[in-house]
Amino acid sequence: MTRVRSSTLGEPSHTAKEVRTAGAAPRSGAPGRSRTAAPPSRPRAALPRDPRRRDGTWQLDRLGYDAQVALDPIKQWTLVCSGLVAHADGVLDGSECERLMNVLEGSDDLDGEEYGAWMAAISDATRLEELLAVLQPPPAESHRELLEGAWVMAVVDGQRTPEESAMLERLAATMGVEPLQLEYWREAWSSAEQEFARGVACVLAWVMGNGAPAPSNVRAAVADALWATPCEQALRDELVGRAMAPCTRDEAAAAVAGMSRARRIAALQRSVVAISRLPRSDEHRRRLVDLAWAASVPAEHVDRWFH
């Protein structure tokens, strides 16, 4: 039985999920998160023998109503893979809900009804299993990206469980990915994950401390920014200390220099929420712009983040 820790994906369907109240304590080490109510999920319709139409599109009968799927196949697989991993340990954490919703909200081609149907689907492990059974196999060139997204989902709450790892292996097998290939990818993902998290900590250290130890009154904002960074909780605890320690602009720029441009931008962007929580943030914003210049990130990116 799956317990939904945060109801940001809407009410669970009538498949008897145990729901924790919004006031329930988050996992150890997790800061509190806001929770928003969503419309209740739709009742499930009878499943068709063949969910495909003659023109090759898919019906949403398995999601709760008869309509065409507007999501492209890769996004369908992204939601199904990440959703199944999120449900695998029996707890749908608030941070996992948030990540799933970010994928869904990035789909501009969904109307309100389709969006509601997918919201209901990703909150229901049984529906996701049904979709996994009927989706056409994804192209081989998408396997790594899809599995990496599912692998990241397993750690957004700070802890990878055996059940989540087993689900990842099952998804890989469904796609035809060999176990040795998956293990090679996991090693590469783990290395990149740690590099990114350490880069975020250095960015925060520079922005918050200006080359000196960060003041104690920013510690909570720093911890929240690192909580939003996918990595094991033990590493997050270590990185809070790193982010509160002295770090120069050039050291912070060097920490992100080896990343791709997209990851450098993402590493800098992690500090925006922390900065926005400070009563006097202008100086911190100027430091972030200064770092963006040193890290070859256009300053206009930083300006957009605060508007």
Image: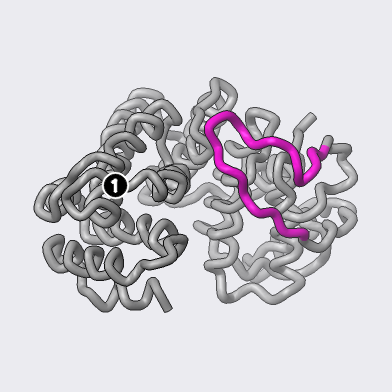
Q: Is residue 23 magenta?
A: yes
- Residue toward you, 11 or 276: 276
Secondary structure found at label 1: loop
Q: Residue at x 35, y 57 (%)?
A: 271
Specify the farthest residue to the top: 162
Q: Residue at x 83, y 63 (%)?
A: 65
Q: Position of residue 276 (x, y in %)?
A: 43, 65
Position of the N terminus, as image quadrant, is top right
Q: Label 1 sits on what residue type?
A: Ala
Residue 208 showing in the rendered view: yes
Position of the C terminus, as image quadrant, is bottom left
* Residue at image mark 1: 214
- Residue toward you, 17 or 210: 210
- From the viewer's perspective, is residue 43 above or below residue 282? above
Q: Is residue 265 left or right of residue 227?
A: left
Q: Is residue 62 left or right of residue 207?
A: right
Q: Is residue 204 left or right of residue 95?
A: left
Residue 143 showing in the rendered view: no
Q: Which residues are magenta?
A: 19-37
Q: Residue at x 83, y 35 (%)?
A: 18
